[in-house]
Amino acid sequence: MAQWWQLLLGLWTIMPTWAGHMLLNVCMNAQHHKREPGPEDELYVECIPWKDNACCTATTSWEAHLEVSPLHNFTLVHCGLLTPSCQKHFIQAICFYQCSPNLGPWIQLVGPSGQGERIVGVPLCWEDCEEWWADCRTSYTCKSNWYSSWHWSQGKNRCPAGDICHPFPHYFPTPTDLCEKIWSNSFKASPEHRNSGRCLQKWFEPAQGNPNVAVTRLLANTAPTRELAYVPIPFSLFLLFLSG
């Protein structure tokens, strides 16, 4: 009996490590993601940082840069052209979402059927939010939540009736508002800074390597997202012990 209890205690001890390991180097189950990450030789412009290990294909990376992206028939220019620096941030964010294999701890099931996945609360480094907000201050939008409630016509999103185009600060008074509201809490504005090892960068210099790998490894062991999937393993052994 003592050996059984030692075995169960050992399983409960290593469970967080198992769960954390399963959150590393994964692609979410979403429409345009690959099943598993891997190298891509020809990723397009802002998606290039992930070419050594990507959840996106070359085609997806190209489509992320189009004015009306076929990824979701979504256009960034629903209130007129964005400034080039503002548009660049959005394309980088789309590449980050589509290509990064380092989002495992923040992947959650979508809807009651659980047929797809999305990210929630990805901790973006403070500079990423601050620079994104600063570079979009003179661009226009009509909504604070781009995740839903658009008017769809002619194959792309349009501002709902009554929603007026204003400069970004009208809908996003602070960098935190922009990062956290723009895609319904997909991102979280972290107080941590780049190179702190405790936040993710939505873009990085390819020659310097992917800094998000180490951050995800650090944070995965404390992430609650998928740990429940591993509870039945030691519990089934416990039932076996009771029946013995």
Image (spheres, rainbow, N blue to C red):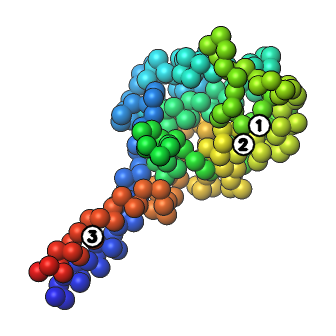
Q: As shown in the figure, which amino acid type bears the numbered disc 2? A: Lys
Q: As shown in the figure, which amino acid type bears the numbered disc 3? A: Pro
Report the residue marked by disc 1. Answer: 144
Which residue shows up at 24% across the image and 82% down it?
6
Q: Is residue 101 visible?
A: no
Q: Residues within 10 Å of mark 3 (few under 14, many from 20)?
A: some
Considering only vertical position in the picture, is 135 above or below 44? Answer: below
Disc sitting over residue 181 in the figure:
2
Report the residue marked by disc 3. Answer: 234
Q: As shown in the figure, which amino acid type bears the numbered disc 1? A: Ser
Q: Where is residue 113 in the image (x, y as percent from the top left)?
A: 43, 43
Which residue shows up at 36% across the image and 34% down it?
35
Q: Residues within 10 Å of mark 2 (few under 14, many from 20)?
A: many
Disc sitting over residue 229 in the figure:
none
* Callouts 2 and 1 close, C-beta under 8 Å: yes
Q: Can residue 178 be seen in this view?
A: yes
In the drawing, does residue 115 fall left or right of residue 111? left
Question: Distance from label 3 to label 1 (Cα)?
Answer: 45 Å
Query: Which quadrant of the view contains residue 172?
Result: top right
N-terminal of the two: label 2 or label 1? Answer: 1
